[in-house]
Image (cartoon, rainbow, N blue to C red):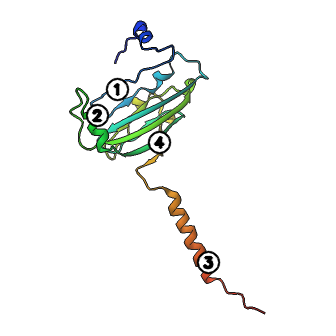
Amino acid sequence: MAARFDASRAATLGQTSGDGTPIMLTIPTDDPWVPLRILGLGLDDDQRVDADVFVLTDEKPRLLAGGPGLTIDRSEPASASLLRDLRSDVGMEWVPDEMWLTYLQLGADAGDLDYDLAVTAEPGRLPAISDVGVEASHARPVTGGGGAGIALWPAVLAVVAGALVLLLRRSPKAVPA
């Protein structure tokens, strides 16, 4: 992958230093790799890097990273409207009717961003540690996020309420004196 910076075009668009233009990158591979470390290039170690990462895979992926700051915000089947919108773009007719959408948020200091994101959507297989770019001892699965699951607080509230009802029914009633 290569990108060319055109200062005169950036000025025409009203962009200044630090502004960016989103780039859609299509990697037709079984095991995509997301180069996160490039987001911190040229920054001081204590400068904050905040980014949104969207990953579309055939199945729910397993994710492996090598440092702090990367969390899953949503992990769910991609909506039909999203996939339809993607298919309407030039060269994107290949997008199937069903895919898995994973939305990750990155928030880390540039000095801590010395890793990448490895992805696999093949059941029973872990992403390659070599794609993360760190020693095996630093690699960690990226987990969490909601979106596809059921919110936990209603279930917890129902269990607590049920337990209270049972306790109140079983407790001996006070006999008036």
Instruction: Report the number of discs.
Output: 4
Please state which amino acid type lies under the numbered disc 4: Asp
**Residue 73, label in figure:** 4
User: Residues under labels 3 and 2: Cα distance?
Assistant: 54 Å
**Lower position in the chain sequence, tag 2 or tag 4:** 4
Q: Is residue 99 above or below residue 88?
A: below
Residue 69 in which image quadrant = top right
Q: Circle 1 sits on which residue?
A: 24
Q: Secondary structure at mark 3?
A: helix
Q: Secondary structure at mark 4?
A: strand
Question: Residue flagged by tag 3: what amino acid is it?
Answer: Leu
Q: CA distance from mark 1 to mark 2?
A: 11 Å
Camera-near label (2 vs 4) is 2
From the image, tell me which residue sits under label 3. Answer: 167
Camera-nearest label, 1 or 2: 2
Label 3 vs 2, first from the N-terminus: 2
Residue at horizontal 51 percent and vertical 61 percent from the top? 154
